[in-house]
Image (spheres, helix red, strand yellow):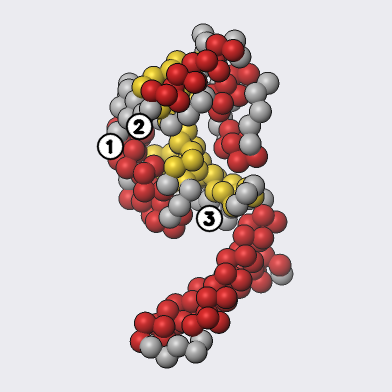
Amino acid sequence: MIHLSKRLQTVVSLVSPGHTVADVGCDHAHTGIYLVQAGISPRVIAMDLRPGPLEKAKENVLAEGVAEEIDLRLSDGLQALAEGETDTVLISGMGGPLILSILEKALSKARVAKELILSPQSDLEGFREGLSKLGFGVTETLIVREDKFYFVFKAAYGVKDTAAEPKPAEVWLEYLTKEAEVRKRIFDKLEADNGEKAVARRSELYDEIRRIEDEINRMRN
């Protein structure tokens, strides 16, 4: 069984068993290999924009004996995927704006998938808003800490956005506590600055800290 990082183990845990999976930006195909070896997915379409990683993916797929179950494709996002060809679209390890761009460029393909498993590396708030604008609702959110905190979203087209609070609660609480501390440090550095921009930023930080601490108190009570 191929080894996955804690982050990628969290990503694959949201894939519905029995689904064909399109792994976008597959790199060396470790995720796809694991999905097949663990019996989660009977077939994976592993796609990457770069020939080099795809060649390494081919070597790994052959070495692990799963060449019949994994279809490797050179693809810019979802371009090499046929509409309705997959149940699950999986995209992880990219910035939030790039993931949204990939979905938007192949919107009809993303919308007919039964589920999207998405793990953006940046712009989380903007990412959730962008997904909603494209018509996708988040049904489950996981948070995992490895070298830093990572979020993984399960979403589908045309469903209600129901996953407001990430799980597990203890990791979410840890994340919120850290975010509050970061903002307090910035606030303290700006305290002696009475310039217009500094005053405005302190006001923003104060509101953000208050919202985060309200959420922390709600979870602890």
Q: Is residue 32 above or below residue 142?
A: above
* Relative image position of residue 80 (x, y in whole percent): 32, 22
The quadrant holding residue 5 is top right
Q: Nearer the viewer, mark 1 or mark 2?
A: 2
The residue singled out by tag 2 in the image is: 77
Q: Amino acid at mark 1?
A: Lys
Looking at the rendered structure, which numbered label has been put on residue 164? 3
Looking at the rendered structure, which numbered label has been put on residue 61? none
Q: Amino acid at mark 3?
A: Ala
Q: Is residue 54 above or below residue 209?
A: above
Task: Assess disc 3: are there few (<14), some (14-19) or many (≥20) residues with their C-alpha within 10 Å of its C-alpha.
Answer: few
The mark that comes first in sequence, 2 or 3, is 2
Label 1, secondary structure: give it.
helix
Q: Amino acid at mark 2?
A: Gly
Q: Is disc 1 in contact with disc 2, using a CB cutoff of under 8 Å?
A: yes
* Relative image position of residue 22 (x, y in whole percent): 44, 26
Q: Nearer the viewer, mark 3 or mark 1?
A: 1
Label 2, secondary structure: give it.
loop
Looking at the rendered structure, which numbered label has been put on residue 105? 1
Q: Quadrant of the C terminus?
A: bottom right
Q: Nearer the viewer, mark 2 or mark 3?
A: 2
The quadrant holding residue 113 is top left
Which residue is pictured at 58% across the width and 33% down the height?
Answer: 12
